[in-house]
Amino acid sequence: MDKLSKIYVAGHLGLVGSAITKKLKSKGYSNLVLRSKDELNLLDQNAVNEFFGKEKPEYVILAAAKVGGIIANNTYRGQFIYENLQIQNNIIHQSYIHRVKKLLFLGSTCIYPKNAPQPMPETSLLTDTLEYTNEPYAIAKIAGLKMCEAYNLQYGTNFISVMPTNLYGPNDNFNLETSHVLPAMIRKIHLAKCLKEKNWDAIRDDFNKRPVENINGSAPMENILTVLDKYGIRIDPDVLTHSPGTLNVTVTLWGTGSPFREFLWSEDMADACVFLMLNRDFKDVINSVEYTNKNEIVNTHINIGTGVEISIKSLADTIQREIGFDGIIKWDNTKPDGTMRKLTDPSKLHQLGWHHKIELDEGISLMYSAYLKP
């Protein structure tokens, strides 16, 4: 892949795709093909076929996907499996038809069993049952990596798959209905701080930038307070305040706070993806000593992670300190925790020579600073 290679980044406006696009540009790759949802409907097989026929990309990075947190995954189960399968099938198949030199498919570590060994090696795939709340999404991603393996083995394509751990970073999704745990916590705790300090202008500004359930900053304050209460941000008369002129505010988060999660700065993930595009081909997997039985080539995907985990409660405490919220965080143990641990084993990636750079404390600080920008 040289600097003038034609590279199609599918999903370039999302958290993953935008980070990869930024990384490619920073490394001098200028011939990028980018399409928004309005410009190219990846669910439309004919549209994707026409696009590949016209643009003829040499390399493809498949970062487009329907994603969300535990609420979204469990609520929109049909959409998550259908849309992800459709997007993957269309792009992977057209990459084969149009002889793309190399494709990078991005999945997620939710592909691993609920009770996988910790840390989770690539070999734990399909060894047990999945976590129920994100099962449809996980099955779609497993199908994608297996499709890449199958096409490589039957058609001689060069499709590689990577499974990043939980990502966060610039251009993240802060929608309270669909966001992942870390950006959701940042927004909730930020809004709780504003509410506690009676900073109504900041609350209205936040809702103007990111409306919640079609409620923006121009709505009556009682409507905004109703939405905040729905998402666990509320004035609580039973909680004492020690700061004159402030309100008694609590934030209620889902679950018990006891699960552990691993988090990777999205720009580190992008760096790993570009590194692998330049340094890893499917033939390298075939030729590795790992596969002594050439008739059973499996688990060819690569984990991308830090190998470091933190409890959800400790994550909330860290974000609370960064934001400066001195109210109380409560936990709703009637809501699901999800998988108790999801720590990746990044040994395969480390052996190739790549390691993460941004630690979690620094990443949270960077992310909150970016969140506050106009």
Image: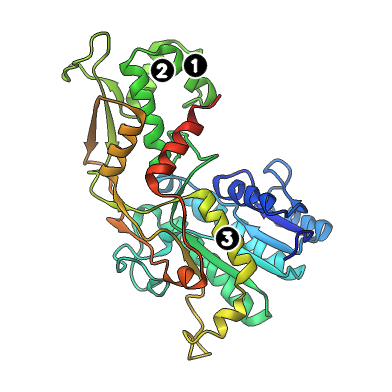
Please tell me which residue lies in front, 152 or 44: 152
Residue that mark 2 sits on: 224
> As displayed, is residue 258 above or below residue 283?
above
Q: Is residue 256 left or right of residue 121?
A: left
Residue at 46 percent of width and 72 percent of height: 348
| Residue 281 at x, y percent in the picture | 62, 74
The kind of residue on which mark 3 rests is: Cys
Residue 128 visible in the picture: yes
Q: Farthest residue toward the top? A: 245
Q: Residues within 10 Å of mark 3 (few under 14, many from 20)?
A: many
Proximity of marks 1 and 2: CB atoms separated by less than 8 Å:
yes
Quarter where residue 113 is shown: bottom left
| Residue 330 at x, y percent in the picture | 22, 33
Q: Secondary structure at mark 1?
A: loop
The dot on residue 79 is none
> As displayed, is residue 175 above or below residue 96?
above
Q: Secondary structure at mark 2?
A: helix
Q: Quadrant of the C terminus?
A: top right
Q: Residues within 10 Å of mark 1 (few under 14, many from 20)?
A: many
| Residue 269 at x, y percent in the picture | 52, 55
Residue that mark 1 sits on: 217
Query: How many numbered dots are placed on residues in this image?
Result: 3
Q: Secondary structure at mark 3?
A: helix
Residue at 33 percent of width and 70 percent of height: 128
Residue that mark 3 sits on: 273
| Residue 274 at x, y percent in the picture | 61, 60
